[in-house]
Amino acid sequence: MIPFSVLDLCPVLEGGDAAQAFTNSLDLARHAEAWGFHRFWLAEHHNMPGIASAATAVVIGHVAAGTRTIRVGAGGVMLPNHSPLVIAEQFGTLASLFPGRIDLGLGRAPGTDPRTTAALRRDFGTADTFPEDVDELERYFSDHPGRVRAVPGTGLKVPLILLGSSLFSAQLAAAKGLPFGFASHFAPQLLDQALRLYRQLFQPSVVLQKPYAIVGAPLFAADSDEEGQLLLSSQQRQFINLRRGVPGKLQPPEKNLRMEVSPAELAMANQAMSCAVVGSPASVKRGIQELVERTQADEIIFASHIYDHQARLRSYQIASEVRRQMVARCG
């Protein structure tokens, strides 16, 4: 049975703050480790009141220091926002502190708005150099980086995974023989096409001999279908608010959300969540099986953007129980 992993955005709750978000994320990571999840990834976003993982490498260090065995990493770092050397130094430091546990997922999008991109001292044109920046980053982690070295970083061979929601990163990951993660947890439109292209074009490398595809899926598991649908409403509302240009903190679930938003907005949110696994343990099991059969994924990484922390823990616990059932059936 394929591994399950966690993608966390350190959600900042309505009525809460970043400190609470970091405490909750570490608690989730510890539970995920105990429940047998493979990775715990954090994602870079900027100028988002509801997401606290902007300083991604710092939060990765916080989570890695508070856990023992689970892999911890970026899902991902938005490389156009940064100098490759700085990222190599940051993740070389993390890999030195936590040997064998650090992943570096790389995205090509800025992960923010144009004004914030400018405040980061970068520009949208840097996305055009993404392949060259990945090459440079790989060189810093190699045994022979050249005259400029990442210290620490040189020779550590930190695992790189290319991430994306389009065909570009799928093709680049295939050409470079790297693992590929598709962001179907919020942008599923090109999922099937991207996976097909990645597998068709894949070139074996010293890193990977055959394709390795990670598929993102929103997870809203609960003890009943009705509760799962209710938990989903917080994510739907946040997605709609983002599209309205008024991003905010994660709000409590709303039974009457459809009365507060337009049908078009709700349809847009549902389309973005079309890979979501929602509902009771039986419904979640069925949804996971269908997603795995559809995508032939090598790994599923779940994002549970749930307001109540205990409900979020329960969501991942249910997923872990479903996986154990599936393993037992395969065995």
Image (cartoon, rainbow, N blue to C red):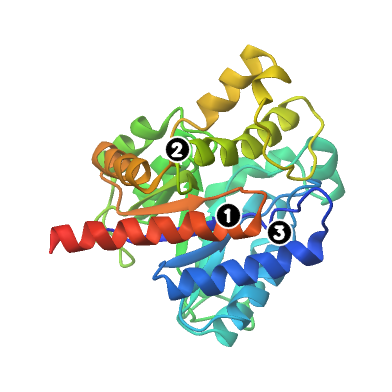
| Mark 3 residue element | loop
Characterize the local packing of mark 3: few (<14), some (14-19) or many (20 or more) Cα atoms within 10 angstroms. Answer: many
The one nearer the camera, 325 or 238, is 325
Residue type, mark 1 in image = Ala
The residue under the point 75% across, 57% down is 52
On screen, residue 249 versus residue 240, left or right, reads: right
Q: Is residue 312 visible?
A: yes
Residue occupied by mark 3: 53
Mark 2 or mark 1, earlier in chain: 2
| Extreme residue in the left direction | 331
C-alpha separation, residue under disc 2 versus residue under disc 1: 14 Å
Q: Are marks 2 and 1 in contact (CB under 8 Å)?
A: no
The residue under the point 27% across, 44% down is 289
The one nearer the camera, 275 or 176, is 275
What label sits on residue 311 in the rendered view?
1
Image coordinates for residue 250, horizontal then vertical, percent:
73, 45
Residue type, mark 3 in image = Ser
Image quarter for residue 59?
bottom right
| Mark 1 residue element | helix
| Mark 2 residue element | helix
Q: Are marks 3 and 2 in contact (CB under 8 Å)?
A: no
| Extreme residue in the top direction | 263
Residue occupied by mark 2: 225
